[in-house]
Image: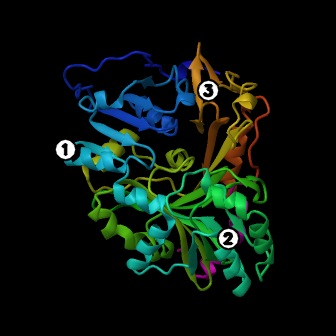
Amino acid sequence: MDGKEIKSETKTEHKSESKPEHKNGNGHKNFLFVSNESLSGDLAWQIQKEGHKVRCYIKSGTDQDVYDGILEKVPNWREEVDWADVIIFDDTGFGEVADKLRKEGKFVVGGTAYTDRLEEDREFGQAELKRVGVNVLPRWNFTNMDEAIDFLQKTPGRYVLKPSGFIGSDQKALLFIAEEEDGKDLLEVMVHNRKAWSKKAKHFQLQKYVTGVEVAVGAFFNGKDFITPVCVNFEHKRMFPGDIGPFTGEMGTLMFFAPSCEIYKQTLEKMGPLLAESNYVGYVDINCIADRYGIHPLEFTCRFGYPTISIQMEGILNPWGEFMYQLAKGEQFDLKTKKGFQVGVVVAVPPFPFDDARTFAVYKDSSVLFRKPSWEGVHLGDVKMVEDDLRLAGESGYALVITGSGTTVDDARKQAYNRVKNIMLQNMFYRVDIGAKWVNDSDRLHTWGYLY
């Protein structure tokens, strides 16, 4: 491995210049990344490789060594605001401060108070979709588990139980999908877990289950309108091949870019006026279930997706620094993208997707090695560079995202998995079926008229 490909600008202690440093030559800009957790380092690294100045702030105490030797980190992001040409907030929860900075004239990529609520409050998100004329699935909200059990006993059927209201990413895993048409399996689980679940989720809903293809559509928004083409993507959220096991957030994704499609027209496009009203700048995605009767939106992602943003780097040809700067300024432009498909595979070690510092202690500081000295398709997870050696950092076990592309899904899969085989890492694991369902899913989506 030639670790020197990563250019370090790391400084553990830093004081802001008295004047903004906005002239880096060749049109290069100053980018400030603000993170609760170590999420957007891969994007920051890409922008840095393009010649821009990059500084990042990470709040989480357990992530303080992530990106060491790769990115320059600062202890207080607010002291860097005047230095920055573009400020990037990489998660929800920053909406109010982002709104304020935009009003002060700063160029900001990130959420708004409105879009934070769209993602974090599922019921609000569904209500807003309905307000703009999008068909949403029937759902019933509860704050009492006994009332939900009573409802299911009186109205048997196949439902999905999911937390509602303002929820954290960890609570999203408290989701149960009924397998039986009368919902008896869900009813039994609810009865046996009523006390435990009532403590973990104060608000929850029963949503009508629909059999179909899970598909998402996303696009970047410049504060006024969508930037095309749009990104059609297929997430793989469960831990094991065949969609078995716990929800991980994401183990990999298949995607492609399209000028438009019915999935976009019937869902995300209709949200444009509301996003413009809130002056949202960033990426927004709606996950859906599609069947022969329609497209049913499930939830919003109003931020970069992970590993979505890394896989988009495989498909988008625009320089990312220029792209983010134009987006933050509210400019209208077209994305240049590869034809065909992109596949991304998450490579992890224990305890991912769980939090267990004792387990990760076995792997922390382990070297990530390459059989051949190639960084093609390699994207950063929670890693750092020590003496030209790429090593695991933080405590998550989320190591790398490996991507590939091709004119067919099979070609993209082959390239991605050949690149995965180039990685040497103790006890690493990954799903081997990312994109494998495309043959069946594409047939159904084309038959129903949702892709063209």
| Distance between mark 3 and mark 2 Cα atoms | 37 Å
Residue to which mark 1 is pinned: 104
Q: Which residue is mark 3?
A: 393
Q: Residues within 10 Å of mark 3 (few under 14, many from 20)?
A: many
Q: Nearer the viewer, mark 3 or mark 2?
A: 3
Q: Amino acid at mark 3?
A: Ala
Q: Residue at x 27, y 33 (%)?
A: 81
Question: Where residue 418 appears, x then y in whole percent?
Answer: 72, 41
Q: Earlier in the sequence, mark 2 or mark 1?
A: 1
The residue that disc 2 covers is: 441
Name the one closer to the observer, 130 or 230: 130
Q: Is residue 162 magenta?
A: no
- In the image, the segment drawn in magenta is 433-452
- Cα separation between marks 2 and 1: 46 Å
What SS does tag 1 mark? loop
Tell me: 339 left or right of 72: right
Q: Residue at x 72, y 25 (%)?
A: 361
At x 27%, y 25%, the residue is: 24
**In which image quadrant can residue 427 be found?**
top right
